[in-house]
Image: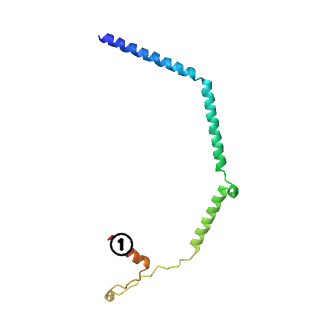
């Protein structure tokens, strides 16, 4: 019984392979290598045409065409260097406050109130709202 089942399975496998081979032959008759080469050439040609169109669209127009990227980069570096040099050469406008020495026995009873700016008042109000 086992041998018969094995033989039947082998026969079905061989029949399936024959059917597959016949189907592949029919497909290959419908398609020949010349048609495939022609189709691939057309695809490559269309791809090249699209690249040329994209290159044409990406080129600068008018006044933008006159700019050289290297020249623009050099000019930007020069301007940044000049700006940095100008900032370094300017004197500091605010000097750090000198520490005030108060004798140990003469500490003020309460701190001197500082003036608050509108931004500081707004920040304090927001912090109070958020319970920070």
Residue placed under numbered mark 1 in the picture: 127
**Residue 89 falls in which quadrant of the image?**
bottom right
Q: Quadrant of the C terminus?
A: bottom left
* On screen, residue 34 above or below 9: below
Camera-side residue of 116 and 87: 116
Picture coordinates of residue 54 (x, y %)? 63, 46
Q: Is residue 9 shown left or right of residue 42?
A: left
Within 10 Å of disc 1 (Cα), the crowding (few <14, some 14-19, many 20+) is: few
Picture coordinates of residue 111 (x, y %)? 35, 84
* On screen, residue 93 above or below 58: below
Dot 1 falls on a residue whose secondary structure is helix
How many numbered marks have been drawn onto this rendered protein structure?
A: 1
* On screen, residue 80 above or below 34: below
**Residue 78 falls in which quadrant of the image?**
bottom right
Residue 68 makes an appearance in the image? yes
Seen from this angle, which residue lies furthest left? 1
Camera-side residue of 75 and 23: 23
The residue at 34%/13% (across/down) is 6
Picture coordinates of residue 29 (x, y %)? 57, 20
The residue at 65%/56% (across/down) is 70
Q: Is residue 52 shown left or right of residue 5?
A: right
Camera-side residue of 1 and 85: 1
* On screen, residue 127 above or below 105: above
Visual colour scheme: rainbow
Residue 132 makes an appearance in the image? no
The residue at 65%/36% (across/down) is 45
Picture coordinates of residue 77 (x, y %)? 61, 62
Q: Quadrant of the N terminus?
A: top left
């Amino acid at each position: 019984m086992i041998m018969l089942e094995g033989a039947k399975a082998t026969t079905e496998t061989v029949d399936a392979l024959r059917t597959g081979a016949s189907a592949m032959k029919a497909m290959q008759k419908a398609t020949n290598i010349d048609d495939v080469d022609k189709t691939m050439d057309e695809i490559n040609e269309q791809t090249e045409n699209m690249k040329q169109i994209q290159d044409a669209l990406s080129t600068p127009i008018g006044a933008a065409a006159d700019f050289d990227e290297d020249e623009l980069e050099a000019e930007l570096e020069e301007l940044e260097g000049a700006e940095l040099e100008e900032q370094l050469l300017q004197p500091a406008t605010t000097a750090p406050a000198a520490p005030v020495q108060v004798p140990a026995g003469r500490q003020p009873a309460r701190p001197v109130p500082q003036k608050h700016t509108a931004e500081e008042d707004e920040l304090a109000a927001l912090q109070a709202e958020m319970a920070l």
